[in-house]
């Protein structure tokens, strides 16, 4: 066998994947071949480094933990108020809608019985539901358009088509410029 075969067997031996007769054959070859002995020693050093490297833990730089804890405490205090601020705005908005709704119902009741007619109220309610449904459909279509646009723009084929279209447009403009150049009426203009 040649040295490459024994080098492969050395790797397999270090990984405990050789049978007993193959190990015996490899040890006999190592006893008589200095090149394979050097390769074996180099592989052993690499394996020792790799096995020992998994035990070494690299710590953070000095002061990292205290700096991180200070920044974390600062952000926790700072961001805690945002939650209450948002809750207050939500509560104020709900109160505003409740007041506006109450005023609208009060205006309907005080304006007369014609506004409270069942048929008119029903048709108005159906119209509002249809409007909300149509608005929902348009919002779904807009969301679908945005998602398709994002997916399309992330595809290499899309950008290839865009670049090809730009290249063809540039070429077409060059052809138009060439075709629309001034026509020579004398030999002097051609020089």
Image: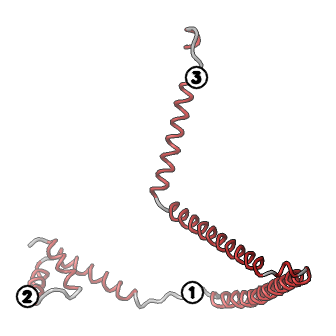
> Given this view, does label 1 or label 3 mark the residue nearer the observer?
3
Front one among 46 and 133: 133
Mark earlier in primary sequence (2, 3): 2
Residue drawn at point x = 54 percent, y = 38 percent: 170
Q: Label 2 vs label 3: CA separation?
A: 86 Å
Mark earlier in primary sequence (2, 1): 2
Residue 164: horizontal and vertical position, in percent? Answer: 48, 46
6 over 145 or under it: above or below: below
Residue 114: horizontal and vertical position, in percent? Answer: 85, 78
Q: Secondary structure at mark 2?
A: helix
Is 160 displayed left or right of 125 in the figure?
A: left
Badge 2 is on which residue? 21
Badge 3 is on which residue? 181
**Quadrant position of residue 42:** bottom left
**Quadrant position of residue 11:** bottom left
Mark earlier in primary sequence (1, 3): 1
Is 33 displayed left or right of 47 in the figure?
A: left
Number of residues whose C-alpha sits closer than 10 Å to that of mark 1, classed few (under 14), some (14–19) or many (20 or more): few
Residue drawn at point x = 8 percent, y = 73 percent: 1
Name the disc covering residue 60, or none. Answer: 1
């Amino acid at each position: 066998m040649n040295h490459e075969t024994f080098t492969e067997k050395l790797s397999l031996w270090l990984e405990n994947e050789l049978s007993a007769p193959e190990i015996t054959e490899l040890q006999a070859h190592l006893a008589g071949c200095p090149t394979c002995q050097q390769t074996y020693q180099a592989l052993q050093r690499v394996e020792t480094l790799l096995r020992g490297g998994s035990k070494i833990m690299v710590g953070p730089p000095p002061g990292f933990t205290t700096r991180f804890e200070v920044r974390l405490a600062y952000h926790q205090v700072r961001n805690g108020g945002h939650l209450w601020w948002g809750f207050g705005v939500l509560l104020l908005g709900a109160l505003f809608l409740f007041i506006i709704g109450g005023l609208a119902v009060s205006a309907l009741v005080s304006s007369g019985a014609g506004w409270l007619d069942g048929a008119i109220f029903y048709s108005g309610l159906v119209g509002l539901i249809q409007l909300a449904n149509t608005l929902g459909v348009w919002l779904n279509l807009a969301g679908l358009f945005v998602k398709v646009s994002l997916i399309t723009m992330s595809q290499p084929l899309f950008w290839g088509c865009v670049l090809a279209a730009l290249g063809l447009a540039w070429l077409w403009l060059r052809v138009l410029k060439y075709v629309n150049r001034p026509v020579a009426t004398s030999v002097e203009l051609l020089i």
